[in-house]
């Protein structure tokens, strides 16, 4: 019989972990899944160790779970930013990553050129104010762009043309990303996911961004007429909605 890989054991452990909560239930569901009960127990112990190491059990303001660590068995890893001279940005992998990296790239091309150290993604939960949107960084669902240039509480850090580009980016993302410049407690460096994990709009927007890779002239870095009537109207409408939601 071909040995079952540890990855397979862990996957099956996830699928039946609820049923395997007691020693009684560890036998029949495990056997039905074709996994030795001792292997399953080991996998479940590993899962618990990982969860204790990574998870906080607490949500950031936007409804995503904050994590204790990045680049260490969790959902948050340092991801590359193609075309942008950064060392990567620590964000939640998957759809969140796709959206936030796209935002960072458009910012670099259309708002202001970025350099190493300009973008901060994940921050430890113990370093953020948990009742403010900056807590979203601890869940890997937010980035700060040049926080030293745009300190929290200060307004007017961007020139009008730069704000036009920011508004266009937010409109392109269908409002699933919010700018801290629109918050009551202003933080112009902060951009964060503004929908909960279950919101289908996130996967829809992320899918559209991924699709642009196969379409010439689309995506971050492609020429954009920020002043076209259609784009300006869309951006202004989004700005109005997001300001009213503050």
Image (tube, rainbow, N blue to C red):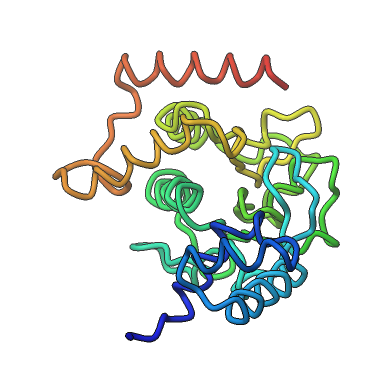
195 displayed left or right of 228: right
Measuring from the top left, give residue 195's x and y in whole percent: 59, 33
Decide: is 209 above or below 32: above
Q: Is residue 95 above or below residue 114?
A: above
Q: Which image quadrant for residue 37?
A: bottom right
Question: Looking at the picture, does residue 114 appear above or below residue 161?
Answer: below
Q: Is residue 217 left or right of residue 157?
A: left
Relative vertical location of residue 243 with respect to residue 73 in this rendering, above or below: above
Taking the spot 64% from the left edge, 69% from the top edge, the residue there is 70
Q: In this orientation, which residue lies closer to the viewer: 110 or 122?
A: 122
Numbered label tally: 0
Front residue of this view, candidates 163 and 141: 141
Residue at screen point 40% across, 30% down: 172
Would you say 83 lies left or right of 181 here?
left
Instruction: Give me the residue at 33% from left, 42% from top.
Output: 209
Residue 118 shows in this picture: no
State the residue lying farthest toward the left: 216
Spot occupied by residue 19 in the image (x, y as percentages of width and height): 65, 55
Quarter occupied by the C terminus: top right
Quadrant the N terminus occupies? bottom left
Judge whether residue 128 can be spotted in this image.
yes
Task: Name the image quarter holding residue 45.
Answer: bottom right
Give the percent coordinates (x, y) of residue 76: 59, 63
- Please give left or right for residue 158 compared with residue 99 in the image: right
Spot occupied by residue 15 in the image (x, y as percentages of width and height): 54, 57
Query: What residue sits 64% from the left and 80% below the top?
Result: 42
Is 18 in front, or is 132? 18
């Amino acid at each position: 019989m071909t040995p079952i890989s540890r990855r397979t054991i862990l996957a099956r452990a996830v699928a039946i972990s609820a049923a395997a909560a007691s020693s009684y239930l560890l036998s029949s569901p495990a056997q039905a899944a074709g996994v030795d009960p001792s292997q399953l127990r080991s996998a479940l112990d590993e899962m618990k160790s990982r969860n204790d190491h990574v998870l906080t059990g607490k949500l950031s303001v936007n409804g995503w779970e904050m994590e204790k660590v990045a680049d260490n068995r969790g959902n948050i890893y340092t991801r590359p930013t193609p075309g942008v001279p950064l060392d990567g940005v620590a964000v939640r992998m998957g759809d969140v990553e796709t959206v936030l990296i796209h935002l960072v790239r458009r910012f670099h091309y259309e708002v202001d050129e970025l350099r190493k150290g300009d973008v901060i993604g994940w921050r430890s939960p113990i370093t953020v104010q948990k009742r403010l949107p900056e807590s979203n960084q601890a869940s890997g669902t937010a980035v700060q762009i040049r926080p030293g240039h745009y300190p929290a509480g200060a307004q007017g850090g961007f020139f009008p043309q730069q704000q036009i580009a920011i508004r266009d980016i937010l409109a392109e993302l269908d409002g699933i990303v919010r700018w801290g410049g629109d918050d009551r407690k202003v933080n112009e460096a902060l951009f964060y996911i503004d929908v909960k994990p279950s919101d289908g709009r996130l996967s829809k927007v992320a899918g559209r961004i991924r699709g642009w890779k196969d379409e010439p002239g689309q995506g971050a870095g492609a020429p954009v007429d920020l002043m076209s009537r259609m784009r300006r109207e869309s951006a202004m409408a989004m700005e109005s909605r997001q300001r009213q939601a503050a």
